[in-house]
Image (spheres, helix red, strand yellow):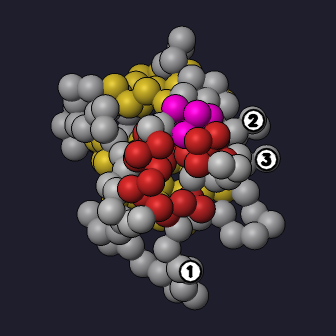
Amino acid sequence: MSQAELARRASVAKSTLSQLESGIGNPSLETLWALSTALGIPFSRLVDPPSRRVEVIRAGDGPGIASGDADYIATLLASSPPNARRDIYAIRAEPGSVRASVPHAPGVVEHLILGSGRARAGPTDAPVELGPGDYISYPGDEDHVFEALTPGTVAVLITEHV
C-alpha cells in the first residue's frame, strides 16, 4: 500500500506518516489506532515490546500512549501472541473529557474491568456507568466511549480479535 493510500484510509496527513517512518514523529493514541485499523492489524503490532518469559509491569510503569483528545493513557500490558487473539491494556483516566473511539477491525470485542474510580463506557449510543470491580463487554467494531467520572480512575481493557 502506498503512503498516500494509507494516509487516506487512516485520515492522517502524509507528512505525519513521513515523520513516523523517519522516527521523528510522536503519534497520539488516535493516530496509532487509525493506522492499525487502516492496515487491518491489531493496535499492539505497532507498539508491541519484545516478549519475555516472565514479565512484570508495576503500576505506573510501562509504555504509556496518551490520547490527543482526552486525559487518557493506555499502557499495553500484553499483546496477542501468534494464534491467540487478545491484547491487554492498563487504563488511567481523569474526568473532564471523553475518550471517543471509532470502530476497530470487524469482529473486535472489548472487555473492560474497572479497578478504581467510576467511569462511563461502552457503545457511544448506550454507555454504562461502572464502579470498582464492574465488568463490561461490548462491540469494539462500533463507535464506543470511555469517560472517567472520578479522579484516579483505573481499568483493565482487553481487546479480543476474531
- How many neighbours does mark 3 have within 10 angstroms: few (below 14), some (14-19), or many (20 or more)? few
Against 152, residue 48 (above or below) is: below
Neighbourhood count class around disc 2 (C-alpha, 10 Å): few under 14, some 14–19, many 20 upward: some
Camera-nearest label, 2 or 3 = 2
Residue displayed at 39% across by 66% down: 23
Q: Which residues are magenta?
A: 7-11
Which residue is label 3 attached to?
Answer: 162
Whether residue 37 is in magenta: the answer is no
Q: Which comes sooner in the sequence, label 1 or label 3? A: 1
The image position of residue 22, as x and y in percent, is 42, 65
SS type, badge 2: loop
- On the image, numbered disc 2 is attached to which residue? 106
The residue under the point 65% across, 49% down is 2
Check if mark 1's residue and mark 3's residue have beta carbons within 8 Å.
Answer: no
Under mark 1, the amino acid is: Ser
Q: Most prominent secondary structure in the magenta stretch?
A: helix
Residue at 69% from the left image edge and 69% from the top image edge:
81
Residues 75 and 103: in front is: 103
Q: Which mark is residue 148?
A: none
Given the image, on which type of amino acid does mark 2 rest? Pro
Q: Residues within 10 Å of mark 1 (few under 14, many from 20)?
A: few
Q: CA distance from mark 2 to mark 1?
A: 26 Å
Q: Position of residue 160 (x, y in %)?
A: 68, 48
- The amino acid sitting under disc 3 is Val
Which structural element holds mark 3? loop
* Mark 1 secondary-structure assignment: loop
Check disc 1 and report the residue beneath it: 51
Q: Nearer the viewer, residue 42 or 159?
A: 42
Q: Label 1, label 3: how many angstroms apart (C-alpha)?
A: 22 Å
Is residue 146 positioned above or below 51 on the image? Answer: above
Closer-to-camera residue (23/64): 23
